């Protein structure tokens, strides 16, 4: 009992560490709390395999309730069954590999514009800087340049909403009773919604036969009568923007920290060959997502009782699985805490491609991250531009992970600009 209490306190203070301790103490399955707040932790590769293979036991709506204030009631992550299938089918084509490659030109241009504005001597919060770049290019490639021109306003508003969901569940419940932060967040969500609706109206009044972005796709689905309602379209737009930048910028904060903290990694990442086939930079991206997966945990609401590793898990429980714990297990990864991009080199002796239940930064099953290829390509392009054009000196040492919605490095990382070309 004391062990369970201690675990609960650790989890609310430092979720990533709390989860590791839970695994050390109880192994692959552990239950905390009692109905109606019963949490079941399924940890490690076999647990992930089970979770991903048994989606019929789960629902997402209740599991990701906390994201409703941002993405709305019809966002993919809170959709289930036929609704989820229909919405996902309509959105998915925009994230196919051939489109993603095209989007990267815009990401490169946005990154270059930001780098152009940096001056030697300046100290930058890299997470904050890259967050703006990522937000802007995500809006631009998915929803067009008119909406992207309002990125600063949209960004300010979205930050207010993301801040309220980046809190432990109990504090969120208190906020919902009507604290000013909650009211501000609702007003900010409504403002973003008005702007998106204005864009939808504009597109309908001025159809452009050549436009091929996600908004065109979503609107097209509406026209043929079988598609999305306006509320669904608005929710997809807002949830894709938020999901697209919150996690990717957290990952970029860690990637830049890892690269700048180790001169050898920085050197190899900037001089290594790039192009088709495996590159060292690909290794940097995979290694960042392994050691610092922004989604520390994933959730499922259990709708049908099941047994796992001798434990009965009743319907109504909230199941949590953890990429973070899995990615640091010594039985899966040699020297798990070492940032070693070369462990991903398929030509390395003894290389073994990790399975989807062993490396899972983007989750798994029917709700696996729709933007996985987009995020990976975007991180690679951003790193490539930063390494090619800047010389940066790290000012943050050993940054602590913070954030519940997306684990990011606290305060930055901060870096001094030594040179920009
Ligand atoms: C490093 C960056 C990213 C990480 C770590 C990440 C991680 C995740 C995870 C863990 C899930 C839930 C999967 C599950 O529960 O099984 C998810 C879902 C999702 N992600 Fe990402 N994501 C990233 C970037 C993106 C980007 C760039 C976009 C879009 C532009 C995006 C859009 C979504 C959407 C829409 C879902 C819900 C899919 C569904 O419910 O069908 N994500 N992501």
Image (spheres, rainbow, N blue to C red):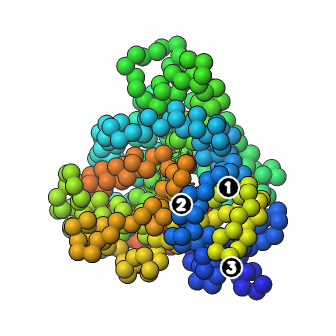
> Between 274 and 370, which is closer to the camera in this rendering?
370
Residue 172 visible: no
Circle 2 is placed at which residue position? 295
Look at the numbered disc 1 and say if its residue's Cβ is closer than 8 Å to ligand 1: no
For the view shown, which residue lies furthest in the top direction? Answer: 205
From the image, state whether disc 1 or disc 3 is nearer to you: 1
Query: Dot 1: few (<14), some (14–19), or many (≥20) neighbours within 10 Å?
Result: some
Q: Is residue 415 above or below residue 87?
A: below
Q: Is residue 387 above or below residue 116?
A: below
Distance from disc 2 to disc 3, alpha carbons, whole Å, reads: 20 Å
> Between 130 and 340, which is closer to the camera in this rendering?
340
Q: Which mark is residue 57?
A: 1
Which image quadrant for residue 48? Answer: bottom right
Distance from disc 1 to disc 3, alpha carbons, whole Å, reads: 26 Å
Distance from disc 1 to disc 2, alpha carbons, whole Å, reads: 22 Å
Q: Secondary structure at mark 2?
A: loop
Where's residue 228, x and y in %? 60, 27
The answer to the question of whether label 1 and label 3 lie on touching residues, with beta carbons closer than 8 A, is no
The quarter of the image holding the N terminus is bottom right
Circle 3 is placed at which residue position? 7
Q: Is residue 377 above or below residue 396?
A: above
């Amino acid at each position: 009992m004391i062990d369970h209490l201690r675990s609960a306190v650790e989890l609310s203070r430092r979720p990533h560490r709390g989860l590791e301790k839970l695994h050390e103490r109880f192994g692959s399955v552990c239950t905390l709390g009692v109905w109606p707040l019963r949490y079941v932790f399924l940890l490690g590769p076999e647990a992930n395999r089970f979770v991903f293979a048994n989606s019929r036991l789960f629902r997402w709506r209740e599991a990701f309730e906390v994201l409703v204030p941002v993405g709305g009631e019809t966002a993919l992550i809170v959709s289930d069954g036929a609704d989820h299938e229909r919405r996902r089918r309509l959105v998915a084509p925009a994230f196919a590999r051939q489109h993603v490659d095209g989007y990267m030109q815009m990401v490169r241009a946005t990154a270059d514009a930001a780098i152009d504005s940096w001056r030697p001597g300046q100290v930058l919060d890299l997470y904050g800087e890259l967050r703006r770049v990522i937000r802007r290019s995500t809006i631009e490639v998915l929803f067009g340049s008119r909406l992207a021109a309002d990125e600063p306003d949209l960004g300010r508003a979205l930050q207010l909403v993301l801040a309220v969901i980046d809190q432990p569940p109990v504090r969120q419940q208190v906020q919902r009773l009507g604290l000013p932060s909650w009211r501000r967040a609702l007003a900010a969500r409504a403002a973003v919604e008005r702007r998106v609706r204005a864009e939808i109206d504009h597109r309908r009044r001025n159809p452009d036969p050549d436009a091929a972005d996600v908004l065109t796709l979503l609107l097209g689905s509406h026209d043929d009568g079988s598609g999305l309602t306006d509320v669904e379209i608005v929710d997809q737009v807002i949830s894709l923007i938020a999901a697209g930048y919150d996690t990717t910028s957290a990952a970029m904060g860690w990637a830049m920290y890892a690269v700048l903290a180790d001169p050898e990694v920085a050197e190899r990442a900037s001089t290594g060959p790039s192009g088709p086939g495996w590159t060292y930079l690909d290794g940097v991206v995979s290694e960042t997502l392994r050691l610092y997966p922004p989604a520390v945990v994933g959730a499922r609401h259990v709708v049908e009782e099941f047994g796992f590793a001798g434990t009965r898990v009743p319907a109504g429980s909230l199941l949590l699985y953890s990429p973070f714990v899995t990615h640091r297990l010594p039985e899966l990864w040699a020297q798990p805490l070492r940032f070693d991009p070369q462990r991903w080199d398929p030509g390395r002796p003894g290389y073994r491609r990790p399975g989807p239940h062993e490396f899972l930064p983007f989750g798994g099953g029917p709700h696996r991250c729709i933007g996985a290829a987009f995020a990976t390509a975007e991180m690679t392009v951003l790193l490539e531009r930063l390494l090619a054009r800047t010389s940066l000196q790290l000012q943050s040492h050993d940054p602590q992970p913070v954030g519940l919605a997306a684990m990011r490095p606290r305060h930055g990382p901060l870096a001094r600009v030594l040179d920009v070309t």
